[in-house]
Image (cartoon, rainbow, N blue to C red):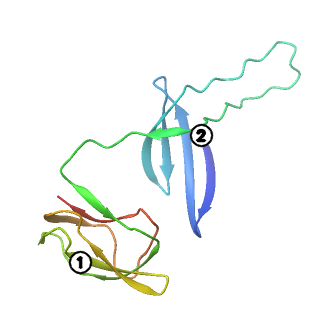
Amino acid sequence: MKQYKYRINGNLYNVTVNDIDEKNIVTVEVNGAPYSVELDRPVHKPVHSPVVRSISNSVEAPKAAVVRPAAKSSQSAVKSPLPGVILDIKVKVGDVIKRGETILILEAMKMENNIHSDKDGKVSAIKVNKGDSVLEGADLIVIE
């Protein structure tokens, strides 16, 4: 198990990388949330010669990782188009909305941005609260 701390756009992320199983899957925790990640190629342990004087338990770091997609569902989340602060949420869980309807207001770069629904449906979850800071690509509202 290895632990890392990353700071991305001012936000701190604590990442714990656990052991890799025989199917090339590694369990990763980001700020306590678990994720299963499939490596795009096997990780090879270094081969040690008997004449090597120092012992190393290191494993070659993976070059890239592929996150397994979640199971297909009729739900999709409206994502933040840019980093900012949530000023107002115009819907609540259970509301039926139409494509193009304003669902929340995001302040970014000292401007208010109306965030619209990308499809018709029913609000099944609201992932943010008024006053929250969000990063680009963060899930805001789930519509089914």
Give me the residue at 49% from left, 82% from top: 109
Q: Position of residue 111 (x, y in %)?
A: 43, 86
Count of residue discs: 2
Query: Image height check: is 42 above or below 71?
Result: above
Residue reaching furthest front? Answer: 100
Give the mark nearest the N terminus, 1 or 2: 2
Observer-nearest residue: 42 or 108?
108
Callout 1 amino acid = Thr
Give me the residue at 43% from left, 45% from top: 35
Secondary element under disc 2, as helix, strand or loop, is loop
Q: Quadrant of residue 53?
A: top right
Q: Which quadrant would the C terminus be assigned to in this image?
A: bottom left
Q: Position of residue 88 (x, y in %)?
A: 31, 84
Residue reaching furthest top? Answer: 50
Badge 1 density bin: few <14, some 14–19, many ≥20, Cα 10 Å = some
Q: Quadrant of residue 2?
A: top right
Judge from the rendering whether residue 143 lies leftward or rightward of residue 32; answer left or right: left
Q: Which quadrant would the N terminus be assigned to in this image?
A: top right
Which label is found at residue 79? none
Q: Position of residue 75 (x, y in %)?
A: 21, 54
Observer-nearest residue: 119 or 84?
119
Give me the residue at 47% from left, 72% from top: 83
Give me the residue at 53% from left, 31% from top: 20
Judge from the rendering whether residue 141 lies leftward or rightward of residue 4; answer left or right: left
Question: Dot 1 corresponds to which residue?
Answer: 102
Gap between marks 1 and 2 measured at Cα:
44 Å
Which label is found at residue 1? 2
Callout 2 amino acid = Met
Judge from the rendering whether residue 108 lies leftward or rightward of residue 119; answer left or right: right
Mark 1 or mark 2: which is in front?
1
Secondary element under disc 1, as helix, strand or loop, is strand
Q: Position of residue 140 (x, y in %)?
A: 32, 67
